[in-house]
């Protein structure tokens, strides 16, 4: 794409402006580091544009607070105080979804994932957010906690201008086929390969 111009212009009846503003379904997959990091970087850009952002973490424990959560929640507070940027909601499983009164446990991840996906479907139907970050969502699909065909159909036919990014290894081929943008992070080298554990500021 020299100078940001596409190499191919489809004969789809859309204007350049219409085509440029189509909502995207994005997938960050592969065995390498950086899938969630790239998605949260996207969320930062979206916040700067004033978009309404919903982050939904499907695997990480609710007890583990990653650095991106702190940053985005502070940006949400800044938006509430000054109007700068956009609103941000952050939900994760492990001790129950934020909208559920029932506390979850480590043993009911499958139920929590199904409830979380049901809530996301309701929000998509209501056009609640402009950007959805479905972090590590490939795993509930891989483990059979949510139906892949239902996910693909829902995301493909979502109304309005809602962007969605899904992260996680081993993205289902049906999701990859439906996506507009797919990036595969390849593992080449990692400090953990030689026994070094994750460190502050790099992994969290």
Image: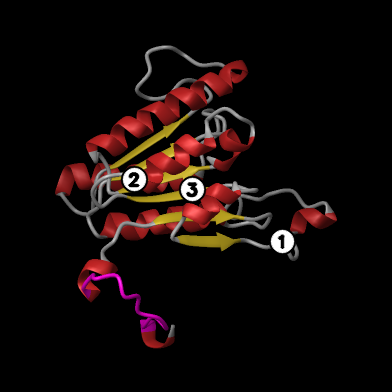
The answer to whether residue 78 is magenta is no
The answer to whether residue 10 is magenta is yes
Closer to the camera in the image, 114 or 80: 114
Question: Residues at badges 2 and 1 in contact (C-beta under 8 Å)?
Answer: no
Closer to the camera in the image, 186 or 41: 186
Calculate the distance from the C-alpha at mark 1 to the C-alpha at mark 3: 19 Å
- Asked whether residue 156 appears in the rendered view, the answer is yes
Q: Which residue is mark 2?
A: 157
For mark 1, give the secondary structure: loop
- In the image as oriented, which residue stretches furthest toward the right? 194
Residue 156 location in percent, x, y?
39, 48
- Considering only vertical position in the picture, is 148 above or below 163? above
Q: Which residues are magenta?
A: 4-15
- Considering only vertical position in the picture, is 20 above or below 184? below
Which numbered disc flags the more N-terminal residue, 1 or 3? Answer: 3
- In the image as oriented, which residue stretches furthest toward the bottom? 2
Horizontally, is 184 left or right of 133 in the view?
Answer: right
Magenta region, main secondary structure: loop
Neighbour tally class for label 2: few under 14, some 14-19, many 20 plus, Cα within 10 Å = few
- Considering only vertical position in the picture, is 123 above or below 12? above
Residue shown at 57%/27% (left/top)?
145
Quadrant location of the N terminus in the rendered image: bottom left
Closer to the camera in the image, 48 or 204: 48
Residue 168 location in percent, x, y?
58, 47
Q: Which residue is mark 3?
A: 166
Residue shown at 51%/16% (left/top)?
104
In the picture, the disc for residue 187 is: 1
Q: Nearer the viewer, mark 2 or mark 1?
A: 2
For mark 3, give the secondary structure: strand
């Amino acid at each position: 794409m020299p100078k940001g111009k596409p190499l191919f212009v489809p004969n789809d009846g859309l204007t350049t402006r219409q085509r440029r503003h189509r909502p995207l379904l994005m997938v960050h997959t592969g065995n390498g580091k950086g899938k969630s990091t790239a998605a949260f970087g996207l969320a930062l850009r979206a916040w700067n544009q004033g978009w309404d952002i919903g982050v939904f973490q499907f695997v990480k424990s609710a007890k583990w607070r990653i650095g991106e959560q702190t940053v985005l929640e502070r940006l949400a507070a800044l938006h509430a105080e000054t109007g700068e940027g956009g609103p941000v909601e952050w939900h994760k499983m492990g001790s129950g979804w934020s909208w559920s009164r029932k506390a979850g446990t480590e043993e009911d991840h499958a139920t929590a994932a199904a409830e979380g996906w049901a809530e996301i479907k309701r929000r998509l139907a209501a056009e609640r957010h402009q950007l959805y970050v479905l972090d590590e969502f490939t795993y509930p699909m891989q483990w059979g906690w949510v139906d892949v065909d239902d996910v693909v159909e829902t995301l493909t036919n979502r109304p309005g201008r809602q962007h969605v990014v899904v992260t996680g290894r081993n993205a289902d081929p049906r999701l990859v086929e439906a996506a507009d943008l797919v990036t595969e992070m390849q593992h080449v080298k990692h400090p953990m390969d030689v026994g070094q554990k994750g460190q502050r500021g790099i992994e969290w």
